[in-house]
């Protein structure tokens, strides 16, 4: 019995498991490539071609194009590689947090401060 | 014989590395956090350990999803810090002790931990930030050599907190059976409660963190009851990095005393804990 046999959703949380990893393999592999500067430059020069090279689905391509991080996660993105994608967009973890929660950056920062009270 | 003299628990958030690069340690946001390391800096200078066993997780630098080991041990002469893709500066190479690494690997497999052995290992902020934090401004890191221990915190299924503790116990047995006069410190890095992804991003649970850290010092086996899912429900998706602290604590089999503790919310998107434990 694995803890993953419990399918009860955890609110606001996507567990990155085998199913997600299979679905997001190309997307994650593309974002893993962004560890290399030459790959980042190649992506920036022609995003569509770079997404095609990594065999992204049409939905995944659209999520990348729309900078829709929640959709990228739902389509199998792992946050570690999504962070590398966000880096290309000059976004840090707090910017990403705000985007995903629908808060402004200041509201998101305040939420974190409030957690310490 | 080699002996374990203590342990340090710390964060490894990339934002810390960026703050160090920008020399922001004394700015209001960071001061409490960095000053919370002074007792650790003093202790490391006084004790001058030869070896640090560093429990951390790789965040998609060395390991991709093509092959994702549950537990890996570094066995290289040195560990290189590489570009992670989003602007964190690399740091000078960190020396390893492959002879001790192999002794640990030999012992672990005999002990039924079937680890992945890495003779080349690029290291990301999971290891580099703690090295910068513990040895500020020192490109030689106090002359210490590291044994990296990497635990999968990215792809489910992940090992239970109990299993990580037992890994630590097994590593301690290996160290204590090593026929060289070395002083060893254990670093547990990462956490504490935080979630980076999804609509629940920014989640922090102070009460749960403080309970876990208290139990970690005084009654670590109490924490065996928590599954990976339990930890994620209570501490957020990346709160599972607490497994590195469990590994660290498992490596301290005898009498343990907490010499220092600091807890800061928020550092970037996380609750950051700092802990110093001595071990007899």
Image (cartoon, rainbow, N blue to C red):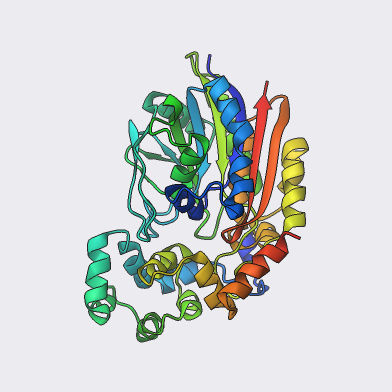
* Image quarter of residue B29: bottom right
Front residue of this view, candidates B159 and A91:
A91
Front residue of this view, candidates B88 and B156:
B88
**Residue B196 in sight here:** yes
Left/right placement of residue B91 relative to residue B240 reads left
Q: Residue at x 52, y 36 (%)?
A: B134
* Image quarter of residue A21: bottom left
* Spot occupied by residue B68 in the image (x, y as percentages of width and height): 42, 54
Q: Residue at x 45, y 55 (%)?
A: B59
Left/right placement of residue A58 relative to residue B142 reads left
**Residue A6 in sight here:** no
Image quadrant in which the N terminus of chain A is located: bottom right
* Spot occupied by residue B232 in the image (x, y as percentages of width and height): 65, 61
Front residue of this view, candidates B43 and B76:
B43
* Spot occupied by residue B237 in the image (x, y as percentages of width and height): 60, 63
User: In the rendered image of this protein, does residue B97 appear above or below residue B27?
Assistant: above
* Image quarter of residue A105: bottom right
Q: Residue at x 66, y 25 (%)?
A: B279
Image quadrant in which the C terminus of chain A is located: bottom right
Left/right placement of residue B248 relative to residue B48 reads right
């Amino acid at each position: 019995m694995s803890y993953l046999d419990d399918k009860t959703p955890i609110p606001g949380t996507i567990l990155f498991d085998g199913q997600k990893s299979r679905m997001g393999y190309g997307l994650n592999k593309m974002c893993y490539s962004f560890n290399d500067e030459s790959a980042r430059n190649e992506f920036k020069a022609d995003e569509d071609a770079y997404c095609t090279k990594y065999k992204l689905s049409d939905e995944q391509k659209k999520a990348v194009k729309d900078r829709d991080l929640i959709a990228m996660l739902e389509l199998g993105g792992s946050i570690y590689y999504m962070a590398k994608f966000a880096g290309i967009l000059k976004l840090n973890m707090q910017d990403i947090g705000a985007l995903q929660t629908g808060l402004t950056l200041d509201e998101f920062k305040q939420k974190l401060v409030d957690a310490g009270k | 014989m080699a002996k374990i003299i203590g342990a340090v628990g710390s964060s490894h958030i990339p934002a810390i590395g960026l703050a160090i690069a920008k020399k922001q340690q004394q700015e209001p946001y960071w001061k409490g956090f960095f000053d919370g390391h002074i007792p650790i800096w003093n202790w490391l200078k006084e004790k001058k350990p030869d070896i640090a066993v560093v429990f951390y997780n790789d965040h998609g630098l060395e390991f991709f999803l093509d092959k994702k080991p549950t537990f890996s041990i570094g066995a290289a002469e040195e560990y290189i810090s590489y570009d992670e893709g989003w602007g964190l500066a690399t740091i000078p190479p960190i020396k390893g002790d492959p002879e001790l690494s192999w002794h640990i690997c030999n012992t672990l497999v005999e002990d039924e931990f079937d680890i992945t052995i890495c003779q080349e290992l690029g290291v990301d902020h999971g290891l580099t930030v703690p090295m910068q934090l513990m040895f500020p401004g020192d490109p030689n890191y106090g002359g210490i050599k590291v044994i990296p221990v990497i635990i999968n915190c990215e792809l489910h299924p992940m090992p239970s907190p109990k299993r990580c503790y037992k890994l630590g116990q097994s590593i301690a047995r290996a160290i204590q059976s090593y026929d060289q006069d070395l002083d060893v410190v254990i670093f547990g890095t990462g956490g504490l409660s935080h979630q980076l992804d999804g609509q629940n991003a920014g989640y922090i649970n102070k009460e749960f963190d403080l309970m876990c850290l208290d139990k970690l010092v005084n009654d670590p086996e109490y924490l065996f009851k928590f599954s990976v899912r339990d930890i994620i429900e209570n501490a957020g998706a990346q709160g599972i990095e607490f497994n590195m602290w469990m590994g660290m604590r498992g490596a301290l089999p005898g009498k343990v005393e907490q010499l220092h503790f600091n807890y800061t919310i928020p550092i970037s998107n996380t609750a950051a804990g700092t802990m110093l434990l001595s071990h007899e």
